[in-house]
Amino acid sequence: MSDLFATLYTSKRISSDQAAALIPPGSKVAMGLGVSQPPALLEALARRASAGEVSDISLYYMLATAIAGETVLRYELRDRIRPVSLFHSGVERALDAIGLRENVPPVEVIPVAFSQVPRMLTEHIGVDTLLTTVSPMDEDGNFSFGTNTDYALAVSRSARRVILEVNPHMPRVQGNCVIHVSQVTALVEHATPLLALPEAAPGAEDLAIAKIIAGLVEDGACLQMGIGALPDAVCSALHGHRHLGIHTELMTPGMAELMRLGVVDNSRKQQHAGRSVFTFAMGDAPLYDYIDGNPLLEAHPVDYVNDPAVIARNDRMVSVNATLQVDLDGACNSEFMNGRQYSAAGGQLDFVRGAYASRGGRSIIACHSTAARGTVSRIVPALSGPVTTPRNDTHIVVTEYGWVDLKGKSVSERARALIGIAHPDFRDALAHPQ
């Protein structure tokens, strides 16, 4: 390591309390997504807020975890640290439940496609501070964003303050995903295991849907998967396939397992041949170990990975995304439930459009046929929330009762096709609404 880089590192290394004190009232702060949320920095900022030493902070982020929920997103701090969510998790749903009881507004949410988040944060909002976790510095003076390049790279290049938590457990990943020590305002060292998600056991419906989707994936296809039991079940159902590729916003344990087994070799990709491409990763310790220094993976910013034009460059792109409701025209609500924001748009429409635009590509929207223990149909006459994927874009819809291709179908033909894969208990009511 260069003496210059080592000296720079030492000059910028401070305590978490000193780092939090660099954030003045009125700041617009971007917090890392998911696994990259920095525990020591967020705890220090929460302490300052609790002590009344900071106020009027706007905190922008996606997919809060317990790390943020137990620190800066505590309910009692909302008058000093204002959460602005770009993608809800259980943390915001819990805050909204408290707010509903106390008759206060829900957590603010900004509707935005994942691919547009970097531009929105840097150009439209003007975020001035970045707080995120990185890997240790290499001999060239670079830190890797590891599990989370997504919007962090863009914000790091425009923010007035870049405050990093250096964690030896954060993997070093190849790709366009590094920041140089000369671009950093302050460094805080904190060694702690990365957040691990519990494995979600697939239900009977997940396994049935996964089997159907696996039958729609050809050998040599390029994959994008979401998070949860269903995508993991799809990955398991693909173990007999060959020469698959990966171009996905999210790298999961199921996808890493496909690489370990040789099912994914990326040999048929036209873009980044031989490499699996992602913008963020969430899972367990074996996943983080697998992506650490692995030359077969690359991380890139989300405005590149989720750009539909980039997605479409790989032939036979297959995107698999979940939804909460599909109306009889084929429009999908994937983010609103019981009158409240449940998640957000994320990158669903990015990949719906990118996959369909690829040569031989397929965009698949999957959902269980029912919710609320079978008492509510997910195929509905009209959506009860915003349109995440418009009817013009929806391609293939899958439930445990089968799949339909909506392209080329009229409105009445779509309705009949979707009713055919609804739960049998609801088909008559859908076909003959009162």
Image (cartoon, helix red, strand yellow):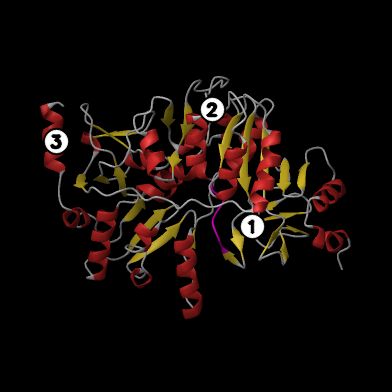
User: Total number of numbered labels?
Assistant: 3
- Tell me where residue 95 appears, x and y as whole percent: 45, 69
Label located before the other in sequence (1 or 2): 2
How dense is the environment of label 1, judged by Cα within 10 Å: few (below 14), some, or many (20 and up)?
A: some
How dense is the environment of label 2, judged by Cα within 10 Å: few (below 14), some, or many (20 and up)?
A: many
Instruction: Give yes or no for contact between labels 1 and 3 (Cβ–Cβ under 8 Å).
Output: no
Depicted 429 relative to depicted 139: above or below:
below
* Residue identified by numbered label 1: 386
- Tell me where residue 420 appears, x and y as whole percent: 83, 50
Q: Secondary structure at mark 2?
A: loop
- Tell me where residue 82 appears, x and y as whole percent: 38, 64
Q: Nearer the viewer, residue 287 or 150?
A: 287
* Residue identified by numbered label 3: 8
Label located before the other in sequence (1 or 3): 3
User: Please, what is the three-letter code of the amino acid marked with disc 1?
Assistant: Pro
Q: Which mark is residue 218?
A: none
Tell me where the magenta segment starts and ends, as one range: 341-346
Q: Secondary structure at mark 3?
A: helix
- Side of 143 relative to 119 (left or right): left
* Residue identified by numbered label 2: 264
Disc 3 to disc 2, C-alpha distance: 41 Å
